[in-house]
Image (cartoon, grey):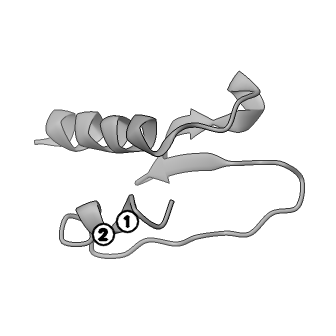
Amino acid sequence: MADVLPKFKTRFSSYTLVSDRGGKFEVSVDGHLLYSKLETGEFPKNKAIVQLLDEHLAAAK
């Protein structure tokens, strides 16, 4: 995840990382759930997270 954040640091005014011990990993933007490990059962590759964020930001324009 550390290599994902620098790509978007100028595109978001803020972000929050929340630690959870329950195996939960979710990516949300402005209340929109983009990815949930609980739903897929798989931890996403960084490339997949970048693609989801790019798609979300492009659709928001």
Q: x, y percentage for residue 35?
A: 55, 36
Vertical side of 52 occupied by 28: above or below: below
Q: x, y percentage for residue 47?
A: 39, 39
Query: In terms of depth relative to the viewer, which is nearer, 41 or 61?
Result: 41
Mark 2 secondary-structure assignment: helix
Query: In terms of depth relative to the viewer, which is nearer, 61 or 6?
Result: 6
Residue beneath the point at 40% across and 54% down:
30
Q: In this image, 21 relative to 45: left or right?
A: right
Q: Amino acid at mark 2?
A: Pro
Q: Which residue is mark 1?
A: 5
Mark 1 secondary-structure assignment: helix
How many labels sit on residues? 2
Q: Which residue is mark 2?
A: 6
Bin the neighbour count of mark 1 within 10 Å (Cα to Cα): few under 14, some 14-19, many 20 and up.
few
Q: In this image, 44 relative to 12: left or right?
A: right
Q: In this image, 6 relative to 38: left or right?
A: left
Cα distance, mark 1 to mark 2?
4 Å
Residue beneath the point at 53% across and 48% down:
27
Residue beneath the point at 67% across and 69% down:
18
Say which quadrant the C terminus sits in.
top left
Q: Amino acid at mark 1?
A: Leu
Q: Which mark is residue 13?
A: none
Q: x, y percentage for residue 46?
A: 46, 45
The quarter holding residue 5 reads bottom left
Q: Find the residue positioned furthest to the top.
A: 40
Residue beneath the point at 27% across and 71% down:
9
Q: x, y percentage for residue 25?
A: 69, 48
Query: In terms of depth relative to the viewer, which is nearer, 44 or 33?
Result: 44
